[in-house]
Image: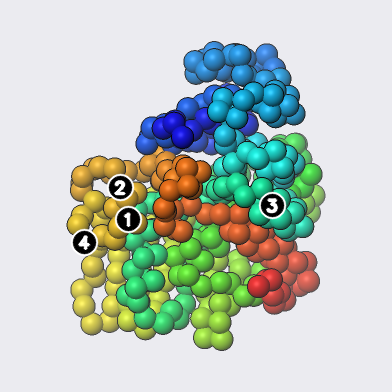
């Protein structure tokens, strides 16, 4: 297989932050070449954007169905191998399903689908196709998150007692308090965003971080949402109690109306031997605390770090890396899987994580609807 993997992009045109993030990430390790795309639903805008970023126009298609149809006419060694799905939530399922059914690998934004039933259908399609499916829970790509995962796996904290994860943003304040705006933005439209805004968009990141780092599974949740206005159908704030075992409990807090907050994802994990603290806005610092020793600070690039952490570090110690590098590590892991190379199972979230995420979102919505009762996730 040639070095560059032929990549298709769906969505992410114009000034889309997620589009820039994925395109840059795909280039960082020199594993991908953007070969075809449908950046925008409007074909003229699609072509104009392709010209702006210097993508050849012969494989910039008018719509998604045309992309699949035309690519499948090409010899296997010429057609797109993997597509990144960066569209609004309601398009993730139909696009990913058709891609899997036609033998394409998929890199998909979260949440993977808008319902748990759709997520299970995708899982069945992926297992049938035998293709790679990477879900871009971006923050799992940070070296210090990977360091935390590997150290916990090796027993650094002993038995886990409690987990406290939060994801606070304030960006939706500019929308939610204006009746016209909150009734027109797609993220607050259940038909486009799915059954949840806050938990579906950012709370699921905190949920994934809990399971990724601890290696434990959330078994049940109890949730209380805040909608702020009676005419708003989507949660913009929520608190979720979680149970991961009889004596392993915690909390996931998410908010899009936390005034003044920017991108405040953070996690604290407490065990019998010690605790870890990590914050996304200061991603190069992993703090290990205990009752008997001074606080230890782990930083990327040092020889004391684990193989998984060092594999995701591109610069010498003292040279900060950020979210582009984190996403690039997910693309790197997906590239290894696509090529059939050996890789660590922590290199990228899979379709299983997508199913788990949808189960979490559905369970939080159900818990809140039932008056904040405990709801069990599926095994």
- Location of residue 306 in the rendering, given as x and y in whole percent from the top left corner: 29, 61
Q: CA distance from mark 3 to mark 4?
A: 41 Å
Residue linked to disc 1: 309
Q: Residues within 10 Å of mark 1 (few under 14, many from 20)?
A: many
Q: Reading the chain from its start, which is encountered first: label 4 or label 2?
A: 4
Q: CA distance from mark 1 to mark 3?
A: 32 Å
Q: Residues within 10 Å of mark 2 (few under 14, many from 20)?
A: many
Q: Reading the chain from its start, which is encountered first: label 3 or label 2?
A: 3
Q: Are marks 2 and 1 in contact (CB under 8 Å)?
A: yes
Q: Reading the chain from its start, which is encountered first: label 1 or label 4?
A: 4
Residue at the (44%, 65%) spot, across then down: 213
Residue at the (55%, 66%) spot, across then down: 252
Look at the picture and state if 232 lies above or below 248. above
Where, by quadrant of the figure, is residue 161 drawn? bottom left
Residue 19 can be seen, yes or no: yes
Residue linked to disc 2: 313
């Amino acid at each position: 297989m040639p070095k560059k993997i032929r990549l298709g992009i769906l969505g992410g045109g114009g000034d889309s932050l997620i589009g820039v993030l994925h395109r840059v990430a795909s280039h960082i390790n020199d594993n991908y070449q953007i070969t075809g795309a449908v950046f925008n639903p409007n074909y003229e805008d699609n072509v104009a954007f392709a010209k702006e970023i210097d993508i050849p126009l012969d494989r910039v298609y008018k719509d998604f169905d045309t992309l699949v149809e035309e690519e499948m006419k090409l010899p296997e060694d010429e057609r797109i191998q993997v597509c990144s799905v960066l569209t609004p939530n309601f398009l993730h399922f139909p696009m990913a399903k058709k891609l899997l059914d036609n033998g394409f690998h998929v890199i998909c934004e979260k949440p993977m689908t808008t319902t748990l039933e759709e997520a299970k259908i995708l899982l069945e399609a992926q297992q049938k196709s035998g293709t790679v499916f990477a879900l871009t829970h971006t923050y799992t790509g940070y070296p210090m998150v990977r360091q935390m995962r590997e150290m916990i796996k090796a027993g650094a904290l002993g038995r886990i007692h409690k987990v406290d994860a939060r994801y606070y943003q304030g960006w939706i304040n500019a929308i939610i308090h204006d009746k016209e705006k909150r009734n027109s933005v797609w993220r607050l439209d259940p038909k486009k965003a799915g059954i949840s805004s806050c938990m579906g968009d950012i709370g699921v990141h905190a949920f994934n971080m809990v399971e990724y780092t601890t290696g434990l599974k959330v078994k049940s949740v109890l949730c209380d949402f805040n909608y702020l206005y009676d005419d708003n159908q989507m949660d913009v704030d929520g608190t979720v109690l979680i149970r991961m075992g009889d004596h392993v409990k915690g909390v996931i807090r998410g908010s899009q109306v936390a005034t003044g907050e920017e991108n405040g994802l953070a996690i604290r994990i407490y065990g019998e031997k010690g605790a870890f603290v990590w914050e996304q806005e200061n991603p190069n610092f992993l703090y290990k605390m205990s009752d008997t020793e001074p606080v230890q600070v782990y930083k990327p690039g040092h020889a004391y770090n684990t193989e998984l952490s060092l594999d995701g570090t591109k610069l010498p110690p003292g040279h900060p890396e950020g979210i582009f590098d984190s996403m690039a590590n997910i693309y790197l892991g997906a590239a290894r899987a696509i090529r059939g190379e050996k890789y660590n199972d922590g290199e990228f979230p899979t379709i299983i994580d997508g199913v788990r995420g949808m189960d979490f979102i559905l369970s939080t919505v159900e818990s809140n609807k039932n008056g904040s009762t405990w709801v069990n996730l599926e095994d």
